[in-house]
Image (cartoon, helix red, strand yellow):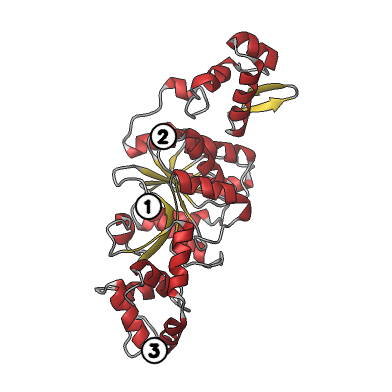
């Protein structure tokens, strides 16, 4: 037992059959991870909320679990596994009304003094909804606010991409699968980028598939980590409204982006506005809710996003409100053609500009 680490033992405990957040919390209540392991491995005692039939099963499982193999996986993934006993376990999750007793994470959490905003919404969002999520993520990150979201398709992914494009405060992704199970698969690159720039975290154990019940549990963590929750687009019965419920339980302010009454993806957000949530027109509204300074007019002219800098910023400034040709950009900036093309690639990939035939225009 001496060679086994606390992280390895904790990861194995979290993966036991029928282990839930609440049951693990009872195991770890007033016990170290090693003491909780010894209790479960003995199979003769059980804390409250742990059914008797699990005691013998858990003891049998622990006797044959490959702890060194799990520790090797932790090293290979470069992740950290913490319990609420650890100093680097997020304080908000330790003190929450429904605390997360374990957390698997890759990357770094923002500092405790960094403001956080949860940006959530439907996976089947509209084009404007995706653009708004991107712009909010970028502008808030540039303003020093960590964007918290679920790394899902649609609004979540767009908000994370915006935060990454800004390169400001580290983003936080809370996922509904194991830290080694990328979901959705098409977000593999985004997953890695968020982990490198900020943090990807989950309370699901290694190998956990994205089962439906895990997402409401995930949503409570998003709410617990957020100072404000912003819903960009949500259908009348969308999963984002579960995050809203969790935010309300915690006294976290909820804001919503108004949408067209003809946009079904905005039915839920428009109802939130009717119910009294504050509207979000741009990042300034969110910053005001946080008690922070708003964005200056130069930044606002770029659509609420931070203005690109360097050569890229010069090329962006040369793209006027109408379609602009590459030749015109060369003439205006005085840059060589290759420099202009490289800047345009960066601006297009970050969503600042779009192609308009053989010309480009601001998004």
Residue, disc 2: 285
List the residue tagged with mark 3: 52
Residue 126 shows which numbered tag? none
Which of pointers 1 and 3 lies earlier in the amino acid sequence? 3
Disc 1 crowd rating (10 Å Cα; few below 14, some 14-19, many 20+) is many
Q: Position of residue 362 (x, y in %)?
A: 61, 24
Q: Eyeballing the image, is 309 above or below 233?
A: above
Q: Quadrant of residue 250?
A: bottom left
Horizontal arrangement in the rendering, residue 98 relative to residue 213 (left or right): left
| Quarter of the image with the C terminus in it | top right
Q: CA distance from mark 1 to mark 3?
A: 34 Å
Disc 3 residue crowd, few under 14, some 14–19, many 20+, Cα 10 Å: some
Nearer-the-camera pick, 7 or 82: 7
Residue 190: % across, % down = 55, 46
Work out whether 37 lies above or below 125: below
Q: How many numbered marks are there?
A: 3
Q: Nearer the viewer, residue 130 or 11?
A: 11
Labels 2 & 3 near each other (Cβ < 8 A): no
| Quarter of the N terminus within the rendering | bottom left
Q: Could you say where residue 148 lies in the image, as x and y percent from the top left?
A: 44, 48
């Amino acid at each position: 037992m001496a060679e086994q680490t606390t992280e390895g033992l904790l990861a194995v405990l979290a993966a036991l059959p029928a282990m839930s957040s609440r049951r693990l919390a009872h195991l770890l209540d007033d016990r170290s991870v090693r003491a909780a392991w010894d209790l479960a491995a003995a199979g003769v005692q059980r804390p409250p909320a742990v059914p008797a039939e699990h005691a013998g099963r858990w003891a049998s499982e622990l006797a044959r679990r490959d702890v060194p193999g799990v520790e090797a996986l932790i090293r290979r993934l470069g992740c950290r596994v913490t319990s609420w006993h650890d100093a680097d376990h997020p304080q908000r999750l330790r003190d929450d009304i429904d605390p997360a007793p374990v957390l698997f994470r890759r990357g770094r959490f923002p500092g405790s003094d960094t403001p956080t905003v949860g940006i959530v919404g439907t996976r089947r969002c509209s084009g404007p909804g995706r653009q708004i999520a991107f712009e909010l993520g970028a502008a808030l990150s540039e303003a020093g606010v960590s964007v918290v979201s679920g790394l899902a398709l649609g609004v979540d992914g767009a908000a994370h991409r915006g935060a990454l494009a800004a390169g400001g405060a580290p983003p936080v992704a809370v996922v509904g699968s194991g830290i080694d199970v990328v979901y959705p698969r098409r977000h593999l690159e985004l997953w890695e980028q968020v982990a490198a720039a900020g943090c990807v975290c989950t309370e699901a154990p290694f190998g956990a598939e994205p089962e439906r019940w895990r997402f409401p549990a995930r949503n409570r963590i998003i709410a617990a980590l957020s100072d404000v929750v912003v819903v960009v687009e949500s259908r009348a019965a969308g999963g984002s409204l579960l995050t809203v419920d969790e935010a309300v339980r915690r006294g976290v302010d909820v804001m919503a982006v108004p949408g067209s009454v003809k946009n079904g993806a905005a039915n839920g957000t428009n109802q939130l506005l009717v119910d009294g949530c504050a509207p979000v027109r741009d990042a300034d509204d969110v910053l005001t809710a946080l008690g922070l300074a708003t964005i200056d007019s130069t930044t606002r002219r770029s659509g609420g996003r931070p203005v690109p800098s360097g050569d890229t910023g010069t090329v962006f400034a040369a793209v006027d409100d109408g379609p602009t040709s590459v030749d015109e950009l060369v003439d205006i900036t005085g840059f060589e053609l290759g420099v202009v093309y490289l800047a345009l690639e960066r601006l297009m990939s970050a969503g600042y500009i779009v192609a308009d035939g053989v010309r480009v225009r601001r998004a």
